[in-house]
């Protein structure tokens, strides 16, 4: 065990936290709570600092309060990641569990990490006197080995994409938090391959975000300046106003609004006419055709066809329905 590790007394809230985690598995009696309160230690290690090395005895069982640790082995001078643990995980030597042998792996901090620790001598003594502690750690180890079995299976039989999807599903948030090279080592794929797969899955999200943003800019321009009322409005002119090419605007209209350019503009025109029809003062002074021209339609037939297509009835029928509702 590294002589540079400095153990101190833990904060009471950290002790309570780990006891709550354990108590969720099985109730803990007051005597065991007092034992943990007496024997738990606190340890803080910096990023890249080694917690314990290969070929040495790991003297403690650790609990991660904050941070991340990486379990590694060395083969042909190459570092191989065997596991990654973060907050609320217990960590110790797997091959030398409970200090009963030399560790075949070493553990290093991926981030600055705060830990609680209990010496294996104390832990083994508590195992002998407290049934609930044996049960709690049995459940914890069962979960660990199930996770390890699933990971080993997907790495053995899955392709790179399947390994990526497995990791993303079972470890939400890790891909954004952990170094790409570390995850690639754990999944036994090249970092460049993992990066390529990650980009292929992030593109749809980025594209959807971009489409929504340009859609918002488009609606702002059209509403603010009532551009739909311009009879000569064209796709390329509208695209320029929001900083897009004609093709890019077509993509926004087709993918985000699910409309063609003409249907998008006509929807605004029809909605403006519908609002006008519901206003008695406007209807006293304007005919439907006059409203259509004011809204931007260039012909009566275009107005009637678009209105019926988008509303499901002719503008005359719509106007009569509004009158019936008022009466």
Image: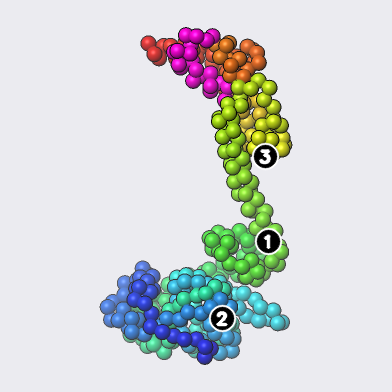
Type of colouring? rainbow
Which residue is disc 2 drawn over? 49
- Residue interval drawn in magenta: 267-287
Q: Position of residue 254 (x, y in %)?
A: 65, 34
From what the image shows, is residue 266 above or below residue 8? above
Mark earlier in primary sequence (1, 3): 1
The answer to whether residue 93 is magenta is no
Mark earlier in primary sequence (2, 1): 2
What number of labels is visible? 3
Given residues 136 and 40, the one toward you in this image is 40
| Image quadrant in which the C terminus is located | top left
Which residue is disc 1 drawn over? 195
Q: Residue at point 58% right, 19% down?
A: 295
Question: In the rendered view, does 1 fall on the left or right side of 248?
Answer: left
Gap in Å between the C-alphas at discs 3 and 2? Answer: 49 Å
Instruction: For mark 3, give the secondary structure.
Output: loop
Q: Residue at point 46% right, 76% down?
A: 114
Residue 88 visible (yes or no): yes
């Amino acid at each position: 065990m590294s002589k540079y590790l400095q153990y101190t007394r833990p904060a009471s809230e950290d002790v309570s936290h780990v006891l709550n985690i354990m108590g969720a598995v099985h109730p803990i009696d007051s005597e065991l709570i007092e034992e943990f309160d007496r024997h738990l230690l606190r340890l803080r290690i910096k990023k890249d600092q080694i917690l314990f090395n290969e070929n040495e005895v790991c003297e403690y069982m650790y609990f991660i309060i904050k941070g991340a640790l990486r379990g590694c082995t060395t083969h042909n001078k190459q570092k191989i990641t065997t596991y990654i643990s973060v907050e609320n995980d217990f960590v110790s030597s797997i091959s030398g569990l409970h200090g009963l042998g030399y560790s075949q792996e070493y553990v290093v901090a991926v981030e600055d990490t705060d830990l609680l620790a209990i010496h294996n001598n104390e832990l083994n003594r508590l195992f002998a006197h407290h049934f609930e502690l044996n049960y709690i750690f049995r459940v914890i180890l069962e979960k660990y080995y199930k996770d390890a079995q699933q990971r080993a299976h997907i790495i053995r039989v899955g392709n790179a994409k399947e390994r990526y999807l497995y990791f993303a599903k079972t470890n939400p948030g890790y891909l954004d938090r952990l170094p790409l090279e570390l995850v690639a080592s754990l999944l036994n794929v090249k970092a460049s391959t993992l990066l390529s797969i990650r980009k292929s899955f992030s593109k749809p999200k980025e594209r959807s975000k971009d489409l929504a943003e340009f859609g918002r800019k488009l609606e702002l321009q059209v509403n603010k300046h009532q551009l739909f009322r311009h009879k000569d409005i064209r796709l390329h002119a509208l695209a320029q106003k929001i900083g897009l090419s004609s093709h890019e605007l077509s993509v926004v209209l087709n993918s985000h609004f699910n409309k063609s350019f003409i249907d998008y503009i006509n929807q605004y025109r029809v909605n403006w006419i519908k609002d006008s029809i519901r206003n008695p003062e406007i209807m006293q002074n304007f005919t439907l055709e006059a409203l259509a021209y004011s809204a931007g339609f260039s012909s009566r037939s275009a107005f009637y066809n678009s209105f019926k297509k988008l509303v499901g009835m002719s503008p005359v029928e719509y106007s009569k329905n509004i009158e019936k509702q008022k009466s």
